[in-house]
Image (cartoon, grey):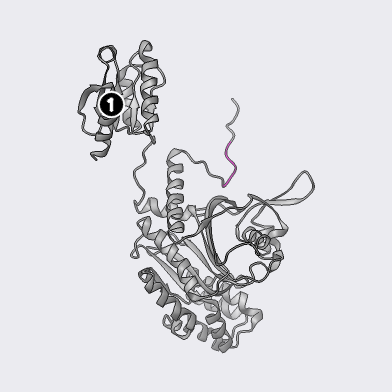
Amino acid sequence: MSSKIQPVKGTREFYPEEMALRNFIYEKVRAASQSFGYQEYDGPFIEAIDLYAAKSGEELVKKQSFTFQDRGGDFVTLRPELTPSLARMIAAKQGELTFPARWWSFGPFWRYEQPQKGRSREFFQWNLDMLGVNSPEADAELIAVGAAFLRSVGLTSDLAAIYVNNRRLMDSEFDALGISAEKRMDVSNLVDRRSKMESAKWDSYALELGLDQTQLDGLKSILDNFDLWKKSDELVRLFSALEALGVSDYVKFDPNIMRGLLYYTGTVFEAFDTSGSLKRAIFGGGRYDNLLADVGGQSLSGVGFAMGDVVIGILLKEKGLLPEFVPSPAPVLVTVFDESLLRESYALAAELRHSGLNVLCFPEPAKLQKQFKFADKMKARVVLTMGPDEFSNNEVAIKNMMNGEQIKVKREAVLQSILGMLNSV
């Protein structure tokens, strides 16, 4: 017996229940984005590898991308992120677009990483950007969209928080400590590892990177100062705007948040669940400058964030925040009593669909007990039966699966009766 072909490592299969979760996340993402006036867009799923070489870094291009040579000999990749495509698309029509541009997208991405909890090689990602404006208030709006999403899925400010920092603020603090520009990348990575290492080992690692004891002590003082934001005019304005937007309960300043030294230039932020059950961020982003420089456009500032569907999906499951899974989108099932009435059952189902209802019809004659059992598994709320007696009297038997009551009504009154049952809950 031949062995079964397994799915490619790190890819995902969306059975109906998993697909319902994906759609739930998409619907909430869409609602949050549109409530702030953002327009939906998307880019190609396959891109030239050169598009990522300049902005995304060597590790993403050489180690994390699904790269291959097409039949024309060009090296292409399944897209690992969307920002470079966004940059090219904006640059191509920069003179035609109206700024600030508010764009969002939700689609599939691929990264060749080690699959583990919260990370897969294939994932869906929400991308949200505001382009053509450079202000703390714009940064606050992006954070507010993220907070609106968290609230909409039931992750209250007791369950999730958005931690904010600012690259310019940190650079000024690094300058004061005499940390050279050449060491900034190493120091940023050092800060990022702080919560993942024992204190003594982290100190030793800092000294190995070339910091002296005075600089190390100063760095630790900075990272423990949660009032440091008051020294930044940008962050003072940001928190004021967040309060006006009604989401300040979600947002906290944290000098330990360090994102993309070569990419972000101002405010940076990451959202986490406060229980700490998952160490990975729910979403993250920040302000960037010169978005279009590497793809031939004119300099343009922007702010954006991205959220993968894997981490948020796990959190919603763990916290019991997903709606009940309903196997079928049709609340009504029409049974087929026997072969002679199959066409009549099909016609009844068609009438109801034409009236706007989603209707299942059993595809063949079968014992009614079997059909009612199927209806129960599909969580149908109303089941219709038209046997010989009902047909001869121009009637239909309607069973309310929610309370077990059954009535007979004239054929022309079926729709009204069903709507009454469906609207009674």
Taking the image as shown, residue 250 lies to the left or right of residue 47, namely: left
Q: Which residues are magenta?
A: 6-10
Q: What is the crowding at mark 1: few (fewer than 14 residues within 10 Å), some, or many (at least 20)? A: some
Taking the image as shown, residue 110 lies to the left or right of residue 139, namely: right
Residue at 56% over, 54% down = 41
State the residue in front, 359 or 17.
Answer: 359
The percent coordinates of residue 390 (x first, y second) are: 26, 15
Name the residue type under label 1. Answer: Val
Whether residue 120 appears in this view of the structure is no
Residue at 48% over, 83% down = 232
> Within the magenta stretch, is there residue 281?
no
State the residue in front, 262 or 177.
Answer: 262
- Per the image, label 1 sits on a secondary structure element best described as helix
Mark 1 lies on residue? 414
Q: Is residue 338 above or below residue 287?
A: above
State the residue in front, 90 or 282.
Answer: 90
Q: Which is the main secondary structure of the residues drawn in magenta? A: loop
The percent coordinates of residue 398 (x first, y second) are: 25, 25
State the residue in front, 216 or 96.
Answer: 96
